[in-house]
Image: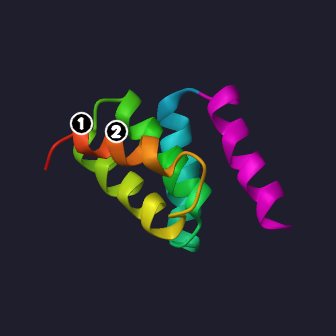
Amino acid sequence: MPDEQRAESVRELTDLFPAPKVVSIAGRAVEIKPDYGAAQKELGLALLQIGDNAGAREALKSYVEISPNAPDATAMKGLIASLGN
């Protein structure tokens, strides 16, 4: 499956499932393929929704490292900064 299709499939998770389920699914995807940027992003956003700011920060940092030129990379950096250390 091409990267664009994979990214779209992961984005659909947040539309279809509650945050805890997205954490489970995206977390598994990240375990299998740690450099899967879209999964790191969705994992981070889902973790944020359930209140795991530290986990969200780490996943979003990974996303930005993997996808530094993504259209939302600057916004994600701002979100990461707002989560503190």
Element on which disc 2 rests: helix
Would you say residue 9 sits in the magenta stretch? yes
Q: Residue at x 36, y 34 (%)?
A: 48
- What kind of secondary structure does the magenta stretch mostly adopt? helix
Q: Which mark is residue 82?
A: 1
Instruction: Assess disc 2: are there few (<14), some (14-19) or many (≥20) residues with their C-alpha within 10 Å of its C-alpha.
Output: some
Callout 2–callout 1 Cβ contact below 8 Å:
yes
Give 8 or 23, whichever is nearer the viewer: 8
Please tell me which residue lies in front, 20 or 70.
70
Region of the chain picked out in magenta, as a range: 1-17
* SS class, disc 1: helix
Q: Amino acid at mark 2?
A: Leu
Say which mark, if any, is on residue 16.
Answer: none
Is residue 14 shown above or below 44? above
Q: Farthest left residue? A: 85
Q: In the shown orientation, is residue 41 left or right of residue 79?
A: right
Residue 55 appears left or right of 75:
left
Q: Check the image and tell me how it is coloured.
A: rainbow
Residue at the spot x=48%, y=44% of the render?
23
Q: In the rendering, at what x and y percent does residue 8 appear?
A: 76, 47
Give neighbour class at mark 1: few <14, some 14-19, many 20+ (Cα, 10 Å): few
Instruction: Assign the N terminus to one quadrant of the image.
Output: bottom right
**Going 57% across and 55% down the picture, which residue do you hit?**
39
> Residue 18: which quarter of the image?
top right
Query: Which numbered tag is attached to residue 79?
Result: 2
Q: Position of residue 35 (x, y in %)?
A: 54, 73
